[in-house]
Image (cartoon, rainbow, N blue to C red):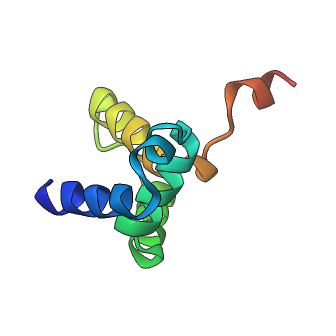
Amino acid sequence: MDSALSWWKGHVKTIGLTTANSMSWEELKVMTTEEYCPRSEMQGLEQEFWNLTVKGSEIASYTNCVNDLAVLCPVMVTHEYKKIE
């Protein structure tokens, strides 16, 4: 958490507070992902998603894991609006 705050403060100094505050959520997510989620780690999460299975009757645990991985790997999940189309 401390390193993320230091990274953000350094970024704000570089681009200015007004510009930093006018960034969209999508821009911030991309910057944070590039800084803190190396491609090799993302590939590992994607592999975990592909290999995810239900163990016994632990449906709730499986569902939680799917939801967590869907947030971390959005390209692996079809959005509801696409399913509807």
Taking 82 as reference, is 10 above or below it? below
Q: How many marks?
A: 0
Q: Residue at x 57, y 43 (%)?
A: 26
Q: Is residue 84 visible?
A: yes
Q: Residue at x 15, y 53 (%)?
A: 1
Q: Quadrant of the C terminus?
A: top right
- Give the residue at the far right of this rendering: 85
Q: Which x, y percent locates residue 35?
A: 39, 67
Q: Residue at x 37, y 40 (%)?
A: 68
| The one of 46 and 18 positioned closer to us in this rendering | 18
Q: Which x, y percent locates residue 48?
A: 41, 61
Q: Which x, y percent locates residue 69?
A: 42, 47
Q: Is residue 51 visible?
A: no
Q: Which x, y percent locates residue 66?
A: 42, 40
- Give the residue at the far top of this rendering: 84
Q: Is residue 30 left or right of residue 54?
A: right
| The one of 23 and 66 positioned closer to us in this rendering | 23
Q: Is residue 80 left or right of residue 11?
A: right
Taking 55 as reference, is 43 above or below it? below
Q: Residue at x 27, y 34 (%)?
A: 61
Q: Is residue 80 left or right of residue 48?
A: right
Taking 32 as reference, is 21 above or below it? above
- Give the residue at the far left of this rendering: 2
